[in-house]
Amino acid sequence: MTKLEINDKIKNMIKKIDFGKIKIKTLSQNDLKKAKEFQEHINSLIEEEAMILLDQKQTLKEEQEWLKNELKDIKRKIQVMLIARDGNKIVGISEIKLKRGKESHVGELGISVRKEYRGQGLGKKLMAEILKSAKKELKPKIKIVRLSVFPENKIAQNLFKKFGFKKVAVIPKQLQHQKELVDEIVMIKEI
């Protein structure tokens, strides 16, 4: 293969996100009808063994139940969730959910981006939007955002640092990844 052919192959592999084409919106009641899209999103992450907490593929029924619960929490103003779509395909999800009781000022953040959309700014866009939504929508007012990240996920850690998150704890052997016990890194950001 010539250098030119290699460069063309690399260019074809690198997909640039057309942010005019990607739509980011809040989870809504209409999304209940689209549970299959959510199931495909999460199962694609589980299949690739992405660094997320779920490790078992979700059934359509489980995904429908999850969506119903998320919508209840959004209605109660204790959660915000954004969905990024490229056409009918979910390519990213971000959410912040308030904890309860004496931790009700703390929101737990989760974010996921499909493999083929990573490294192109979608995670950064979802992060900025979900933090804005949390400040605006959550009741009681959010004061701290907390997240957990796998130690191997340096790209995510760097993104979180850019948004002002600080590493506050490393909890040994709290997570499983590819059948190995790994540390959990806890990061927080005050807002």
Image (cartoon, grey):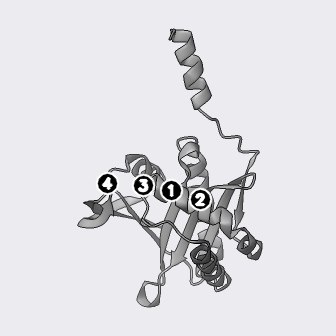
Give the spatial CA distance, label 4 vs label 2.
Answer: 23 Å
Residue 41's tag is: 2
Q: Which of marks 4 and 3 precedes in the sequence? A: 3
The location of residue 123, given as percent across then percent down, is: 56, 51
Name above or below for residue 52 compared with residue 70. Answer: above
Give the spatial CA distance, label 3 vs label 4.
Answer: 15 Å
Q: Which residue is mark 3?
A: 49
Tell me the crowding category of disc 4: few under 14, some 14 to 19, or many 20 or more residues within 10 angstroms, Cα based: some
Secondary structure at badge 1 equals helix
Toward the bottom, the furthest residue is 101
Q: Which residue is mark 4?
A: 151
Q: Which residue is mark 1?
A: 45
Name above or below for residue 75 compared with residue 49. Answer: below
Secondary structure at badge 3 equals loop
Q: Which of marks 2 and 4 precedes in the sequence? A: 2
- Write the residue at 65% across / 81% down: 68
Tell me the crowding category of disc 3: few under 14, some 14 to 19, or many 20 or more residues within 10 angstroms, Cα based: some
Callout 4, which amino acid? Pro
- Write the residue at 56% across / 51% down: 114
Tell me the crowding category of disc 2: few under 14, some 14 to 19, or many 20 or more residues within 10 angstroms, Cα based: some
Give the spatial CA distance, label 1 vs label 2.
Answer: 7 Å
Give the spatial CA distance, label 1 vs label 3.
Answer: 6 Å
